[in-house]
Amino acid sequence: MTTRPGLRERKKAKTRRLLRQEALRLFVEQGYDDTTVEQICDAADISPSTFFRYFPTKEDVVLTDDPDDSGDLGDLGGFDPLAEEPPAASGPAGPPADDAVRATLHELLARRVGRDRDTVLARFALAARVRPLRARLWQRQEAQVAHTAALLAMRTGRDEHAYEVRLIAAVLTAAATETLMYWAERNGEPGLADLVTRALDRLGGLRL
């Protein structure tokens, strides 16, 4: 059973969504570089000090995933990657990926997409167009790798610091980010379900 967040948490989530919504709107209308934090705050009717409590920098409005709004595995546009049988591979593939590897890639994408597909699509499309954002996105991978290694360790009972675990975590983290970038650059087509299948075809043989 899922516990509903308290009033304080719901208000914080609402403020965070409002700031991001207005920021993304302004970025599209007048460009990322030409939009200031002050303009975002004016549009949301929120003070700059409140903005910086939610997002340390303007970049973070685009790049930071919402900690309180992660989705479950059913949030990939109706795709439940743990239950659905993948379509036939489009080309030669290696051995099937280990179940823990498959499940971890699914979870990484589901968590990052969350419940608001359109907002995530807009964020990654913007990151793809703005070079400093794209560079910053890839610079943040180290923390994501550690998180992915912990997920793999939880599923397999392996040490999250073991070389093999960290290596596969790095591959899956990069695969998840590149999948989302490719998906956003093409306005959500092909769908994530198809891209996940294609990624796993190419990552066949990854085992723990």
Image (cartoon, grey):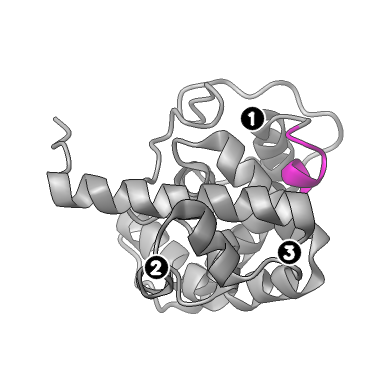
Residue 181 seen in the current view: no
User: Which span is picked out in magenta?
Assistant: 181-188
| Mark sitting earlier along the chain (1/2) | 2
Element at badge 3?
loop
Q: Are the residues at dot 3 and dot 2 in contact (C-beta closer than 8 Å)? A: no
How far across and down, in percent of the image, does residue 156 sit?
Answer: 35, 56
Read off the residue under disc 1. 193
In terms of depth relative to the viewer, which is nearer, 108 or 137? Answer: 137
Q: Amino acid at mark 3?
A: Tyr
| Mark sitting earlier along the chain (3/2) | 3
Left or right of 128? Residue 2 is: left
Question: How far is the residue under mark 1 from the one under mark 2?
Answer: 40 Å
Element at badge 1?
helix
Marker disc for residue 10:
none
Specify the farthest residue to the right.
91
Read off the residue under disc 3. 32
Left or right of 11? Residue 34 is: right
**Which SS does the magenta portion mostly show?**
helix
Q: Amino acid at mark 2?
A: Ser
Please state which of the two labelled residues, at mark 3 or mark 1, is closer to the viewer: 3
Asked which quadrant contains residue 153, the reply is bottom left
Q: Is residue 49 above or below residue 126?
A: below
- The quadrant of the rendering that contains the N terminus is top left
Read off the residue under disc 2. 47
Q: Is residue 42 above or below residue 167?
A: above
On whether residue 185 falls in the magenta region, the answer is yes
Residue 34 seen in the current view: yes
Please give the name of the residue rendered at 34% of the width and 46% of the height, measured from the top-left corner.
14
Please give the name of the residue rendered at 47% of the width and 53% of the height, measured from the top-left corner.
44
